[in-house]
Every structure is written in structure tokens, then in C-alpha cells.
Amino acid sequence: MPQASEIAWLIPVLPLIGAVVSGLSLISINKKINKLREYVAIGLLSFVGASAVISYKALFEQINGSRSVEKLFVWASAGDFQIPMGFVLDPLGSVMLALVTTITLLVMIYSHGYMAHDKGYVRFFTYLALFSSSMMGLIISPNLLEIYVFWELVGMCSYLLVGFWYDRDGAAHAAQKAFVVNRVGDFGLLLGILGLFWATNSFDFNDIALGISQSLADNSLPGWAALLLCFLVFLGPMAKSAQFPLHVWLPDAMEGPTPISALIHAATMVAAGVFLVARLDPLYSLFPIMQFIIAMIGTITCFLGASIALTQMDLKKGLAYSTVSQLGYMMLAMGCGAPLAGIFHLITHACFKAMLFLGSGSVIHAMEEVVGHQPVLAQDMRLMGGLRKKMPFTSITFLIGCIAISGIPPLAGFWSKDEILGNAFVSFPAFWFIGFMTAGMTAFYMFRLYFLTFEGDFRGNDEQLKATLISAAGLIMEDDSHENEGTSEIDQHEESHDESFHGEVHESPWSMTFPLVFLAFPSVIIGFMGLPWDSKFIQLLDPDEAITLAQEFDLKEFLPLAIASVAIASIGITIAYLAYFAHKIDLSVIFAERFPSINKFLSRKWYLDEINERIFVKGTRRIAKEILEVDSKVVDGVVNLTGLVTLGSGEGLKYFETGRAQFYALIVFGGVILLVAIFGFQSPQVA
């Protein structure tokens, strides 16, 4: 087999070929291709699998000491102006490629079971292949312009996948919200890219950093302008990686199928922003104030996501706000000048959060057999409980994910999160404290999810509770799955399901449990690749920094911070245990009733949706209405007046069209006399 550096361009191309062939087949021979759904899935899996093989070969070559490779060609040129395109294969890209292809393959296997009876099965797999191609292309892009192309393709795929069940109002609105919010960030990103090109005449990451540094040194570019360009570029990662205040789209995106939540909203797409900031670290490191801004936004996002997750009863939305919080940790690392720590947490988080989302899908899949296809019921933890005995694989892997994300050693989350907090403690102690407290909140709400879902007694048969939840959501209780609005989760059954949903909860099929078990292993052991005194991960990405960190490691500094992190996480787990498993304390009495305003503030998600609705949505509509008034009264008025003047003048002039030569001669003679009189009046008097 040739070197990966020679065929790396095939990594995004292969899934693209599969997606194009499948997509064209859906357009031309829809019925036939849907009958061959399993063959299509196997074909698309094969294309992504081939990309995975090349990606892993590239990773092994980098581990064995191969040099980074960059191959470019001129895509467009005009005189001296040239736009290069191509690919770059370096340690960071190789690690990300291995991650994306692995998660994509597992999600596609999982989707075979989860979407088995959905009428859009082939379309779903086509979107998955297209997304994976776009994400792989983004990773190997050698410059900002090419990244922007794939950045937009990833955003388009996100829109298609979030709104996959377009017959649901919630899914359609969530897709629109994700699209609009990301357009805000992408507009800033485009302006920043164009501005950096204007300042440096390059799209290359390193050349941009060198060019900006040189421009600042010779005063050809004001410092404020360079800082503004950096912030504009950062707007793209802010939206894509769901950073405050552009995070609002991510929780709503849970309206899409659960495999999508695992793939693009936990493991890959939302990590694209963190990846881009890491690529641009040579640029951001020139501006300490920019690093402070990134760290501050990351810290706010980290705390915001965790605080809102405390009150969520929807299983998927609880995990969604958890994702927002963990993305905040990653951005905090970027702002602390520790991009490799942020990337390491990105890798570990992708493993256990994808597992958690897939686990939630397994639970929802089982709950729908009992409570029906209403997402309000199937995803509400108040109707769950006691699932551990009936879903052993799902419960064990979910528990492993909860322990990992809580930062309990020796699982992966402890090593990556502790490294971020250690860097924050040195760079921004105040941000470290917020991140430290957030770690305790994370442990609490994650084990709250676990205990409510898997422990205690099953509450799914409580008809009164179902009716209460349906009534609170403003929906109509449905007994027949085929009459449900937006019934796409399991509704397209080939077999008849005429009975009202009173089945038994059971473990999911192997196609859904296999990815869970597979992801459990890296969630446990991958953290050992980033031991602070001997980090193989950092040694791969930056050998010089690995040597420096190993030399500077001090056990006396490491242990207090590590022990404090474990202690705060243990406190969070203990409170969750006492409240939701042992039922020794009642948090609704201790907190919700004593501090109703704070509880409402958190349950209403900091009122950010209401603020956006009032300021941006209604404000935009108000401005549009006023512009419409100007258009109808002023612009149309001018146009109508012009028409009336033309019409009136035409009506008047028609009487001069007599057809008599004598009349025309008289008009000409009168005009001449008038001109003589005018010019004679204006002539100077002769003395």
C-alpha cells in the first residue's frame, strides 16, 4: 500500500463519491434505491471504512516519525495573484482524522439499528457520508480559504441532519435556528479571513501569523485592526463550537435523530471550532488580550452550560448542555495558551460523550415501546427509572461515561480536564476557580441523569404523570403511533403496531450496543496517553513541548489540584446519590422552593432564548416592517408620482399632435421668438 501522504486526498473524496452516487440514485430511482437500503448502507460504510484505513495509516506513520506533508496546486490565478488548494497531513490532522472516521463508522453502524424502520433510511446514510466527507476535508485543509469551503459544507450537512424529520415543527425550527446562528459566526469568519489576506497576502496559517507579526513590528497595521481581525475569525469557532452567546442553537439541535447528536453535536462538528482555534494558535498567541477574551468566553460557556444542565429533565438536552459546558473547557485551554490540552480534551470528550449520546438513544428507543413516539415522553427522565436491570449494556456504558466526564481517575476525562484546569490555575486563577466549581456541577448533573434514568423504580407506566407532562407541553396525547405528528423515530415499522404502547423495556439490538461497548474502552484507557509527566499525546503533536512539560512537572503542584478536582467531583456525585438514589434529601425543597428566582432563571436557560427572540427576532421583524413601510410609501410613491407626471404630460401633449404643418410651423416660430426674447433679456446693455 502506498504512503498515506500520497493518497491522503482520497480520505474526503471516497465518502463524497458514495454520497453523490446515493444522492443521485434517490433523485432518479427513489423507490428502487430504498428497497436496496441495506446494500446502500454497506456501500457507504465501505467508503467511510476505506477513509478510516487511510487515516489510521497516516496516524501510524506520524507516530513512527514521518514528517508532515503539504501538497498544493494552484486552484485559481490572475497575474501574481494565486489561490492554492491541496491538503496537509500532520500529527494534529492525523489524530483528528482517526477520531472522525472512527466515530462516523460507529454512528453509521448504530444508525442501522436506530433508523431501521425509518422511511428516510437511505437519505440519512447519504447525509452521514456527505457530512463525514466535509469534516475530513476541513481537517486536511492547508489554509483558511479551503477550510472556509468545507466549513460551510459541514454547516449545510448539519442543517440537513438536524432538520432530517422536517415534518416535525420542532426539527424544522431547530434546523433554521442552527443555520441562522451559524451564519452570524460564519459572516464574521469570512470578514476576518478576507481582512487577514488583505493584511498578509496569504491564507496559510503560519504565513498569516508571520505577516501580522511583521506588520505590527513595522507599524504598517494598527494593533487594534489586527485584534479586530482575530476576533472576527474567532466568531466562526464561537458559533460552530457553541460558545456564549452563540451557543443557543446546540440544545435545540437535539430535535434531530440521536445518532446525529452523537456524531456532529458531541464528537466532530462542534469540535471544528476548537480545531480551527488550535490551527490559528500562532496568530492568537501574538495577542494576550485575545487569549484572555477566548479564555473568558470559554469560562462563561463552561459555567453556563453546566448551570442550565442542573434543571433539565429531557435526557438529550441535559447531555446537550453538558456538551456546551465541555466545549467551554476546551476554549478555556485555548485561551490559556495550551491548545494541545484543549485538543486532548476534545479527543477524550468525543469518546465518552458520543457514547453517552448513543446510550441516550438506546434508552429513547426502548422507552418508545412503552410511552409512544412523543419525544416529550420518551426523553423525559421523570418517566424513566429502573432501566439498569433491563438494559445492562446501555446502563454500564452510560455509567462509564458519567464517571469519565465527571473527572474521576483513572478514566479519560480526569487526565484531560485536570490538564486544562492546571493551565488555567497558572494563567487565570479566577477562571480556574469557575472551572473548578463547574467540575463539581458536572459530576452532580451527570449522576443525576444516571440515577433518574437507570436506578429506582420504572415510572413509564404512570398514566397520570404522562398526561401531566403532555398537558404541560401543550400537546395531545396520542395512542396510535401512526397518527403522531413527526413520527419518524421508529414509526415506519414494516410490521403492524396497532396496540397502544404498553410493551416492555428491553435492551437494544447488537448494532446499537456494539458502538457503546466499543467506545467504553477508549473512555477508560485513552487518558493514559496524556499523563502530565509522560504525555504520549503531546509528544506526538509537539515533541519539544512534551520534553518541556516533562521537565517542568512537579508532583507537589500536581497532587493538590488533582485531589481538589476529585474532591469536588465526589461531592457532586454524593449529593446526586443522596437526592436521586437514596432519597435522603429533597433538592426541590432545599433549593427550588427556597430560591425560586434562581431555579426559574436556570430552567429558562438564563432567558437567553427570550432575549434573542425579543431583540433579534422581533427586532429584525420590526425593522423589516419599517423598511417595508418606507418601500411602499416613499419608494413606491416616487415611482407612482413619476408615472402620474408622465401620464399627465402625455395627456396634455397629445393635443399638440394635430397633424397640420401650419400648426407645427407656428409652434416653431413661437419657440424661436421665445428664445430671442430670453437671450435678448440676458444680453448686456451697450452704452
Image: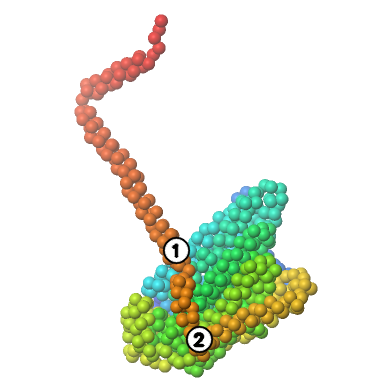
Mark drawn on residue 563 = none
Q: Is residue 581 above or below residue 185?
A: below
Q: Along the horizontal axis of the image, is 662 left or right of 52?
A: left
Residue 658 % position (x, y): 20, 28
Residue 592 location in percent, x, y? 46, 78
Looking at the picture, tell me which residue is in the foreground, 219 or 167. 219
> Looking at the picture, which amino acid does disc 1 mark?
Ile
CA distance separating discs 2 and 1 = 35 Å
* Residue 61 falls left or right of residue 582: right
| Residue 611, numbered circle | 1
Q: Quadrant of the N terminus?
A: bottom right
Residue matched to label 2: 585
Mark 2 or 1, closer to the camera: 2
Task: Relative to 115, say whether 181 is above or below.
Answer: above
Residue pushed farthest top? 687
Residue 184 visible? The answer is yes
**Which residue of the protein is positioned furthest toward the front in this rendering?**
594
The answer to which image quadrant residue 55 occupies is bottom right
Color encoding of the figure: rainbow
Around disc 2, counting alpha carbons within 10 Å, would you say few (fewer than 14), some (14 to 19), or many (20 or more)? Answer: some
Q: Earlier in the sequence, mark 2 or mark 1?
A: 2
Tell me which amino acid carries mark 2. Ile
Residue 409 in the image, given as x and y percentages of width and height: 65, 84
Q: Is residue 5 visible?
A: no
Element marked by disc 2: loop
- Picture residue at 77% right of the left edge, 72% below the top: 552
